[in-house]
Image: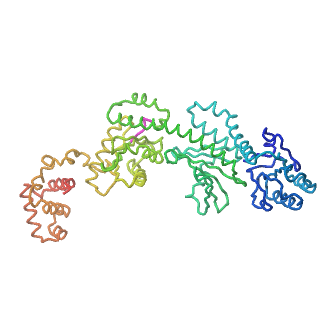
Amino acid sequence: MGVSIKEILSSEFFKEYYIISGEKGINREIQGVVLIDAPDGYKWCRGKELILTTGYFYVDNTELFKEVINFLYENGSAAIAVKTDRFLNTIAEEVTELSDKLGFPIIFVPARTAWMDIIAAVNSIAINRYISRINDTNYLEIHNHSNDYQKKISNIVKNLSLELGLSVAISDIVDKNIICYPADNNIGEKVNKTDESNLNNYQKEILCEKLNIYRIKNLDDNKSWIKMNILINNTPITQLIIWEGSDKIDYYDLFSIRVSYALFLSIYEQIYVMNSYERKFYDNLIESLINERLTSKQQIIKEIRMINNFRLNIDNSYVCLLIEQDGDNPSFYSIREKLYNTLLLKVPKDEAIFGIIDDNTLAIIKDVSKYKKDIIGNVRKEIKNLLENMRNQFDHRSLMVGIGDACDNIVSIRKSYFEALKAIEIGKYLYPKNRIFTFEELGPFGLFRVEDIQNKSYSSNFSLISPLLKDNNRDELLLTLKVFIESESNYNVTAQKLYIHNNTVRYRISKIQEICDIDLEDPIVRLKIAIMLMFTNE
């Protein structure tokens, strides 16, 4: 919103200025100051300008002066300010009569005043008004030492709305929280409609490249709005949205938006620091739960009192998810901030907490009380989208997810953690093409000892096929055995799959039974061997 002629003339700087004619237009709005000292310069005015001139081209040219007055009035300019004691010592009566008739002010400017000083003075009045509005609401005094960030943000939104005379909202990308002024029950729907992905036909105009302020116009209904992202460490945290009316925002509006941006940024940086503390707290909290340093509800309640923003109900049912990367990638700790910001955008704070366990493992403790059935299936669907997003954000790293079973409360999450760990460690053998593994789908394989699989302790659990691994022809014998088991002990089918003669298959199977001292006609023996072959990687 611009500044009125009355407002600038009442200031100390303009005390020697006065309206020569056209006083009815004293409340006309100024949105910028321009200097015109060319005979046709007025033709490039777009409206709401305060025109500065020496009047040189209007000396003895009353008709041109009247033409300029008419054009500026019809074009919506604010007023014309003339140094009448420089060249244009007197203004023709025809001109002042036209000015009075239209209510288009002609303002006297002292000859000694520099143009730059006039422009700076008008700009200062517009700028100081917004700063005064902030001070008048006691924003700095009342809220500066408060941790109630929502009140601070609401205060800025309200001040900006009053200054612009437009509806303003700030939409938190992480918390999905929206603060608007004036109050609007349908604000969520309106914010959603400003998303470019929901528009079929629109135009985007950059207003300030440095701060990424831009205007979007929906070409289907000609409605427009201003948007800007507030970023922390190059990550969008929240969006400021301003809905334009019939008039577009002006130069002084953009300044108010810039000041608001600085205030918002200051607050969100404070929130960021607070969240950084919280993230470290959650790292420690999850580690304490897993390592049994917190074993009772009372201990957890005492621990979470340190965090004001803890939103989980510890009595709800939970499940543990582990996101694991292979060891060839940089440590999760080295990308902690980017990693956490990515998760905050996808994992609601009132549904889950997360923390880094080690260089290659991140744990998510998720509230699953909202699911009435197929808990693990629903969690799997949610984590699938998150996993894809993380892979895109982090250079397509090789990531795997393990999901434990649900437990009755957060105190019992240790069990779900180890189940999630086993889901990855065993699942990648059973389902080598998968990226997401659940303890539930392991079935009886969940009873296996991971250490034996990792260390290939075939001498004990894998003793049935251990002698075969030492044979000189181990590769062809193992392949034949595997295909034979998969073919339900059918010699002909096995021969077809391996492109060898039926007798060759019979010879190899006989040799395998001799080496391992096993009976492949026994269904239990065949089952054991089928399971063992899944983990040999041979």
Q: Residue at x 48, y 38 (%)?
A: 275
Reply above or below: 328 against 473: above
Query: Predominant secondary structure in magenta?
Result: loop
Instruction: Confirm whether the magenta stretch covers residue 315.
Output: yes
Answer with the quarter of the image where residue 361 lies: top left
Q: Is residue 189 visible?
A: no
The residue lying toward the viewer, choosing from 54 and 262, is: 54
* Above or below 502: residue 250: above
For this view, does 379 lie left or right of residue 455? right
Residue 62 placement (x, y as % from top left): 89, 59
- Colour logic: rainbow
Q: Position of residue 500 (x, y in %)?
A: 14, 71
The residue depicted at 75 percent of the width and 60 percent of the height is 44
Is 443 one of the magenta-colored residues? no
Q: Position of residue 303 (x, y in %)?
A: 42, 29
Q: Quadrant of residue 65?
A: bottom right
In magenta, the rendered stretch is 313-318
Residue at the far right in the pictured view: 93
Q: Nearer the viewer, residue 294 or 392?
A: 392
The residue at 9%/57% (across/down) is 471
Quarter of the picture containing the C terminus is bottom left
Nearest to the observer: residue 527 or residue 462: 462
Residue 391, placed above or below residue 260: below
Residue 462: image location, x then y, percent: 15, 50
Q: Is residue 19 left or right of residue 270?
A: right
Query: As drawn, is 445 to the left or to the right of 392?
Result: left
The answer to whether any part of residue 376 appears in the image is yes
Number of numbered discs: 0
